[in-house]
Image (cartoon, rainbow, N blue to C red):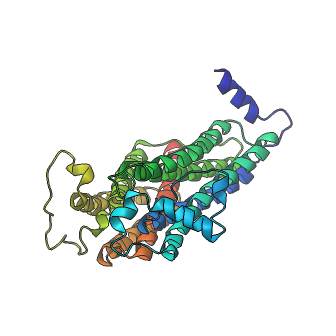
């Protein structure tokens, strides 16, 4: 209770202080753009098998990449001890130039994470010191910062599953899904809170939008699709079949119906990701049509995002999981989350006004 009271006092607006809801909203929108960027870079990191190229997590010293040939050689030597290198580099092995390529993507991914942390923490401190955060929003911002910190910890927890395991050649797909979905949940929270603050800037008496039952159901359907997509990425299940709408010439692929099948069989996971997508499409169409009269932009954004995502998903499969098509698929997936969060927010406002 004492901690909660202290947090409330920190963000409370004393008499005479001027809250800046529009400025806070714009800041959160900029952070949301950075989160979309890190989701895309994370996807590229996974697609290029770069995630295990940095075997240690050094928060401060890890900011700089190796700056000499001897430093590069030392990092390469650490990577060669991983199971991924031993089992997947092939008879010819990997040269230093190839290692530098995968190292860059993992390093860039980690740097973006640090940038997001600072881009959130520093303005948060400024807004808090100036008492510019509207009453009732301090706990949300603190929760989002905790999510950012947790995201970094989950990232290392994910990487450690591949670095410290002598049997796995990739990170755990369960940990990967937790890492990705936490980022997408943060993105949705940023969009939702920014929309609330924009409403407050227009009307000082405005209240936060409620989450309706229908919108929550749409969110749950989309969550399942995102979870399946994360498992497909983590298990390289996109390579299970390269044809569409059939899978290796079959409507229903041959699978091993074992106890681990649902979460470990790449053929079944790609099949489920393909066809649950249409359940997600139906849910998103319903939501987009529901908010069409009150927020036409959100309706168009949802339709555009999921339509593009489906087409890119099909193209990813039929291209043999081409890097930039697959990365674009993940980008549009993040944009679909942002568009859906806005539409869910608008649905809450419309239902309350009805």
Indicate whether 295 appears above or below 12: below
Image-quadrant location for residue 171 = bottom left
Q: What percent of the width, then of the height, locates residue 204?
A: 72, 43
Indicate whether 188 appears above or below 240: above
Q: Nearer the viewer, residue 107 or 261?
A: 107
| Image side of residue 95 versus residue 257, left or right | right
Q: Nearer the viewer, residue 178 or 95?
A: 95
The answer to whether residue 346 shows anywhere in this view is no
In which quadrant of the rendered image does the N terminus lie?
top right
Image mark count = 0
The answer to whether residue 239 shows anywhere in this view is yes
Task: Give the residue displayed 49% in from the left and 53% down from the top.
Answer: 184
Q: What percent of the width, then of the height, locates residue 71?
A: 61, 64
Q: What percent of the width, then of the height, locates residue 83?
A: 37, 57
Image-quadrant location for residue 37 = bottom right
Farthest residue, direction top:
1
Task: Give the residue displayed 42% in from the left and 65% down from the top.
Answer: 49
| Image side of residue 19 versus residue 274, left or right | right
């Amino acid at each position: 209770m004492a901690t909660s009271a202290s947090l409330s006092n920190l963000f409370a607006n004393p008499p005479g202080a001027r809250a800046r809801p529009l400025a806070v909203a714009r800041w959160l929108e900029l952070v949301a753009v950075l989160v979309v960027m890190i989701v895309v870079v994370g996807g590229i990191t996974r697609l290029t098998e770069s995630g295990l190229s940095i075997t240690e997590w050094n928060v401060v010293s890890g900011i700089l990449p190796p700056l000499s040939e001897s430093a590069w050689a030392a990092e390469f030597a650490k990577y060669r001890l991983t199971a991924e290198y031993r089992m997947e580099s092939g008879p010819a092995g990997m040269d230093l130039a190839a290692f530098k390529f995968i190292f860059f993507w993992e390093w860039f991914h980690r740097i973006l994470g640090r940038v997001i942390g600072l881009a959130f923490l520093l303005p948060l401190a400024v807004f808090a010191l100036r008492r510019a955060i509207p009453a009732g929003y301090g706990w949300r911002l603190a929760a989002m910062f905790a999510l950012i910190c947790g995201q970094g910890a989950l990232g290392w927890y994910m990487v450690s599953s591949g670095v410290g395991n002598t049997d796995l050649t990739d990170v755990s797909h369960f940990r990967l899904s937790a890492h990705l979905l936490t980022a997408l949940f943060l993105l949705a929270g940023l969009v939702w809170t920014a929309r609330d603050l924009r409403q407050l800037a227009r009307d000082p008496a405005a209240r936060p939008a409620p989450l309706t039952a229908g919108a929550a159901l749409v969110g749950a359907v989309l969550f399942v699709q995102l979870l399946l997509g994360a498992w497909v990425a983590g298990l390289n299940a996109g390579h299970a079949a390269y044809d569409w709408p059939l899978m290796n010439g079959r409507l229903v692929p041959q699978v091993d119906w074992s106890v681990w099948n649902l979460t470990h069989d790449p053929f079944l996971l790609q099949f489920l990701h393909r066809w649950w997508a249409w359940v997600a499409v139906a849910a998103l169409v319903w939501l987009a049509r529901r908010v069409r009269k009150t927020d036409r932009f959100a309706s168009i954004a949802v339709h555009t995002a999921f339509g593009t995502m489906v087409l890119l998903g099909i193209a990813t499969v039929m291209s043999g999981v081409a890097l930039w098509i697959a990365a674009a698929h993940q980008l549009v997936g993040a944009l679909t989350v942002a568009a859906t969060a806005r539409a869910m927010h608008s649905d809450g406002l419309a239902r309350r006004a009805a």
